[in-house]
Each structure stands twice: as C-alpha cells, then as structure tokens.
Amino acid sequence: MAAQDYFWLGLSVLVLLAFGASYVQKQLKLRRAHDWPIQSGRVDSATIRLESRGDKQSAYVAEVRYAYAMNGAAYSGRLRRNFMREKSAQQWIANYPPGRILTIRYNPGNFADSVLLEREQIGVHAA
C-alpha cells in the first residue's frame, strides 16, 4: 500500500469514528432524558428541506423547532428526522403544527439542554 492509501484509509476510519461517537452521544442523552423533569412547550415552526447526501443521494430532513420557558427565561430546541420520501416527511411534520403544546424534557442542571421525546407527545403517529 502506498502512503497515500494509508492516509485515505486513516481519514476514513477517523470519519467513521466521529459519526459513531456522535450517534452514541445522542443515544446516551436520550436515555438520560427519561429521568429529566417535564415542562410544557410549544411548536414554533416545522419545516422540510431536501438535503444532498453525496452523489445522487438525498434525504428529506424534517425539523420541528420548539420553545419553552424556565424561571422566566426563554429556551428553544429542535427535533429532526430524516426521510427518504417527501410524503413521509409531510405526514410526520403534520403532527407538529405551529402553536401545538408539547411535553419537553429538560436537563435540571442546564435548562437550555432539552429533548422532545416523540412517544410522550399525545396524538403523534410515527410516519
């Protein structure tokens, strides 16, 4: 193997490790969030956009932005999901019209850190 091949192999391994670490970190946060206190919030916006994912690949990214207040201070967060079909993204986002009341889990040690757990939202159906 040439030195250039080792470079690209090493770079590929580093990128895969970074994505893996990010995934594990998100999963651990979701597990911890089950024990966090609950606060009411509301949907600020819900959008869908088509993102390119390399050559001839793309995904529809649906994003819900929400707001909540703690001790008189305003905070916000977001929930994102990826879809292969636009119709699936539209069906999912239809569950989150602006102004809808939500159940938010917040980190008691950092009010700005929050999670919106889909299964805790009444009337939300998976797409």
Image (cartoon, helix red, strand yellow):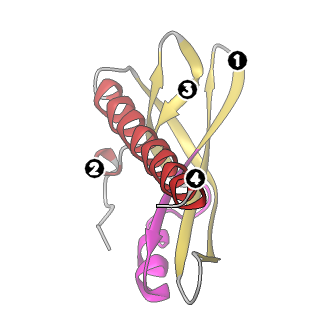
Labels 2, 1: front one: 2
Q: Secondary structure at mark 1?
A: loop
Q: Amino acid at mark 2?
A: Arg
Task: Look at discs 4 and 3 and give the one toward the viewer.
Answer: 4
Q: Which residue is mark 1?
A: 72
Looking at the rendering, the stretch of residues picked out in magenta corresponds to 78-99
Q: Which residue is mark 4?
A: 7
The residue labelled by disc 2 is 119
Q: Where residue 89 sits in the image (x, y, percent)?
A: 47, 77
What is the CA distance from the residue labelled 2 to the residue labelled 1? 27 Å
Is 118 included in the stretch rendered in magenta? Answer: no
Between residue 34 and residue 84, name the one nearer to us.
84
The type of residue carrying mark 3 is Asp
Amino acid under disc 1: Gly
Disc number for residue 113 = 3
In this view, the residue farthest toward the top is: 109
Distance of label 4 from label 1 (alpha carbons): 52 Å
